[in-house]
Image: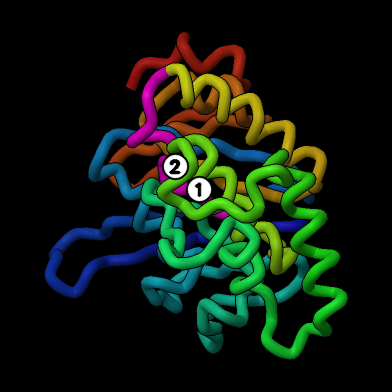
Amino acid sequence: MFVEIENLKYKYPTSNELTIKDFSLQMEKGEIVAILGESGSGKSTLLKLIAGKEKTKVGKIVIDGDVVVDKKTCKSPKKRGIGIVFQEHDLAANKTVEGNIKRTLPLLMAKNAKEDRVEEMLDLVDLYIFRDRFPKELSGGQQQRVTLAKALAPEPSLILFDDPFRNLDPSTQKNLREELRAILKKAGITSIFVSNNKADAKVLADRVLFMEDGEIKQTCKPEEVYNVNL
């Protein structure tokens, strides 16, 4: 398995109850898993634990054979090889599309290699003709595609999506779902997508998990997502 999460548990210091309760998940390379759940179900906390934004040594996380969390290990976020896309686009207002993508690449990366990687990302997210524009000159959907290109540019092993379409209008959401799945499949990137929108999961995912009170309550195929009530 490419991603292995075993018996993960987590409790916030200010809480008396577990936010994540014995969570386990296995993923194949290139698989897209959607995790659905209402606010407070533990979705975002789970992503923070995988990314290293919150820390626990209860359970195990292995990504591409690399142990990032277990009883003796808790690697820093920078050493996990994980990309993250949030609801907000997180773009530098004073940098162009090209500049925003380039700033995520390693400082010691050769100049020619950086230029080649930026070209590849611009082509992948279909923003080549917008390379010299600033974020304020882009639509919400275009800004999210730049954010995706930023996350993909360093070639992460895994990308986490924290409800990235929530602040977009329905028409843009619909188009981006289809575009995002095509981009991720073309790049072969393993992804976890959390949302409370079943439409996101139906279009994007290879597999859908329903989360409630820090636990997975049910699993289904994308085409079955509207038949599940929790």
- Kind of residue indicated by mark 2: Pro
Find numbered disc 1 in the image and state the secondary structure of the residue it sits on: strand
Image spot of residue 19 (x, y percent): 28, 56
Quadrant in the picture for residue 110: bottom right
Q: Residues within 10 Å of mark 2 (few under 14, many from 20)?
A: many
**Rendered image: mark on residue 164:** 2
Residue 110, compared with residue 164, is above or below; it is below
Q: Are marks 1 and 2 in contact (CB under 8 Å)?
A: yes
Q: From the viewer's perspective, is residue 69 above or below residue 146?
A: below
**Residue segment shown in magenta:** 159-170
Label 1: how many residues lie within 10 Å, few (<14), some (14-19) or many (20+)?
Answer: many
Residue 13 at x, y percent in the picture: 19, 74
* The C terminus - image quarter: top left
Residue 5 coordinates in the image, percent (x, y): 58, 59
Q: What residue is rendered at 44% in x and 32% in y?
A: 210
- Residue 165 magenta: yes
- Of residue 112 and residue 4, the one placed in the foreground of this image is 112
Label 1 to label 2, Cα distance in Å? 6 Å
Specify the label residue 215 is tagged with: none
Where does label 1 land, which residue?
Answer: 161
| Residue 169 magenta-highlighted | yes
Kind of element beneath mark 2: loop
Left or right placement of residue 83 versus residue 31 in this view: left
Q: Is residue 3 left or right of residue 12?
A: right
Residue occupying image coordinates x 77% and y 70%: 65
Residue at the image position 38 percent from the left and 44 percent from the top: 215
What residue do we see at 38% from left, 31% from top?
168
Q: Position of residue 12 (x, y in %)?
A: 23, 68
Q: Looking at the figure, which quarter contains the N terminus?
A: bottom right
The one nearer the camera, 146 or 17, is 146
